Image: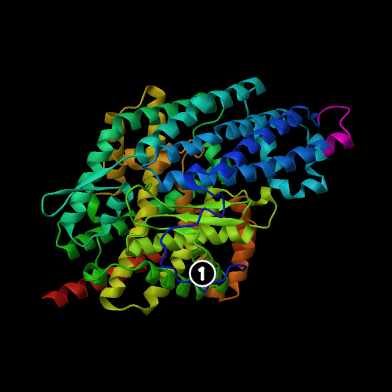
Amino acid sequence: MSTTTKNFPTSNPSWDTESIFEGGVESQSFRAAVDQVVEDLAGIRERAKALVSPSAVSFGQADQEAWVSVLLDSRRLQDRVNETGSFSWFMASTHTDDPRALRLPSLLNDASTQLRAMSVDVQAKLRGLSDAQFSSLHGLEALSSMDLLLREMRRDADASMEPALEALAVELNRDGLHAWGELYSQVSARMEVQVEQADGTTRTMSVGQAKNMAEDGDREVRRRAFEGLAAAWAKVAPVSAQALSGIIGSQQSVYRRRGGDALTEPLNANRISRKTVDAMHEAADAHKALLVEYMGLKAQYLGLEKLAWYDLHAPVGATADQEKISYEQAQRFIVTHVGSFSERIAEFCRHALASQWVEVEDRAGKAQGGYCSTLPVSKQIRIFMTFGGTPSGVQTLAHELGHGYHAWVMRNMASSEQQIPMTLAETASTLAEALVEEAALKQAHGSDKLRLLDDRLRRAIAFLIDVPARYRLEHAMHEKRAEGPLDEENLTEMTRAVFGEAFGGGLESVDGLFWTSKLHFYLTSAPFYNFPYTFGYLFSKALYARAEAEGPTFARVVDSMLEDTGRMTVEELASQYLGVDLTQTAFWAEAAGSVASDVAQYRKLVQEQMANRK
């Protein structure tokens, strides 16, 4: 790798963005790049409009060459849009108290709208093609890297509305669907949380800072943070409900005219079948009783009758009384343990961290959550999160570095082959989490092992109970919106009902305002941004089991599989690399099989630790 890792581990918690575009929020080079992208897109859209449909009798070599030029150039332009778009979000995420930064993502609206409009222009010429007509494009060597993408474009063209309606939808969505999402982003980014302190004073925090307190060893601190967050989200609940009602209403208006339902496009975008998603959730549901038992054991350990929502992330075992983990310790821990599986992954992690590609500073003025963003032109990545020195913070960092490694493996591939579905995008990230977690568990004993098992079972709760509940809640939102507008009362009622059933009595109460705080519900370009997390969790567990069985050589197989994540559907990939059928519940049940042994170990350790207290 080009960058030395002598600066690893780094003590600098902030990322470098100057090497992308100089000048930060006021970057002139960024604005010039956006202007150039918009200008170039206008030109390529005119070329797209002029394309001759393969259904034309006169379609010949010159027409084929024009298609190749437009399709390849549009992919390169998409890369430039992604590069500038990522930078705009870097600024907005790290400067939520600066209105100039929050406005930067909107500068990409013209470019995004033109890309969608151009997609409509191109798809209109692919409607109703016979296999022979389609092969005049699909069979071209120059477009071989776009094999899967072309097939999906044809499928979507045949399922689309009339071209004029699709073009109108693109225009309306700019100031409708996507504007609702932007409204939520701006409102939530500016939120401040007032958290009561032990001395009766209040401290103003960002959402990310307050969320990190969910892992504090003091229950009163957790409660106060939860109540501060609840009060902050309650203030924006009316606006959030209006935004969510507008988003889902806009989506419904379009997908009904296309002849699909709420899941049609999310399934297509994730290259997964409905049967696979159903089988996966069936296996997840089968583990609810075990996880409810775990919640009961944790409550018993903490001296509670039942866990409250804010107790789910309470520390147990050794870390309950230990100092916070430093950022440098977290880096070494991750690199050491991913290196036990793959030195290539460890080398990438050292490179990314030493190159200041990671933003973890714990301060106010930052957006909530975490993400990994690819910079396809610079061939770099950036990671955003708030590191609070907790075990889950270490896992989040490992998770995002796993995303980064996935992008790094694919960085020199054709642009169209780097377009991966979220289902498979979560594979490397969740595998990295598992590697860090499993290596640490093998070395731990007593209260240390209890802590690590608790971290592991909390993730099982997240992916096997919480995420499926989000999936069902989003379904319920669509059903309710079909009857009329959504409001804060019916959204809160639905949330309590869905999550109450999902957690099966394992909690004394659930967070009725979860619908307000979960950014995923407001991502207008990615509806049902939930089930891919359960997929990634279970699929990576299956990968880890295979790696343990086959040894270090399997790391190379994983690399090859990651390279193919933009070339195959999830079912095709699993069949080729694991020899399994994802539409069968048996695969998912086996992947989740370790939950039973984890709960059994947890039960034993809790009993031992409680006996030692006496």
Picture quadrant where residue 259 is located: top right
Residue 60 lies within the magenta run: yes
Pick the front one: 553 or 164: 164
Mark 1 neighbour class, 10 Å CA radius: few under 14, some 14 to 19, many 20 or more: many
- Residue 554 in the image: above or below residue 395: below
Q: Amino acid at mark 1?
A: Arg
Pick the front one: 289 or 523: 523
The image position of residue 169, as x and y in percent, is 57, 24
The image position of residue 82, as x and y in percent, is 58, 44
- Residue 224 in the image: above or below residue 484: below
Residue 159 lies within the magenta run: no
Pick the front one: 145 or 71: 71
Q: Is residue 219 left or right of residue 247?
A: left
Quarter of the rendering occupied by the N terminus: bottom right
- Residue 135 in the image: above or below residue 161: below
Quarter of the rendering occupied by the C terminus: bottom left
Residue at 42% x, 52% y: name it.
370
The image position of residue 376, as x and y in percent, is 62, 51
Q: Which residues are magenta?
A: 55-65
Residue at 68% x, 56% y: name it.
413
Residue 590 visible to an observer of this rendering: no
Picture quadrant where residue 384 is located: bottom left
Pick the front one: 453 or 91: 91
Residue at 27% x, 29% y: name it.
489
The image position of residue 6, as x and y in percent, is 52, 74
* Local secondary structure at mark 1: helix
Label 1 belongs to which residue?
350
Residue at 54% x, 23% y: name it.
172
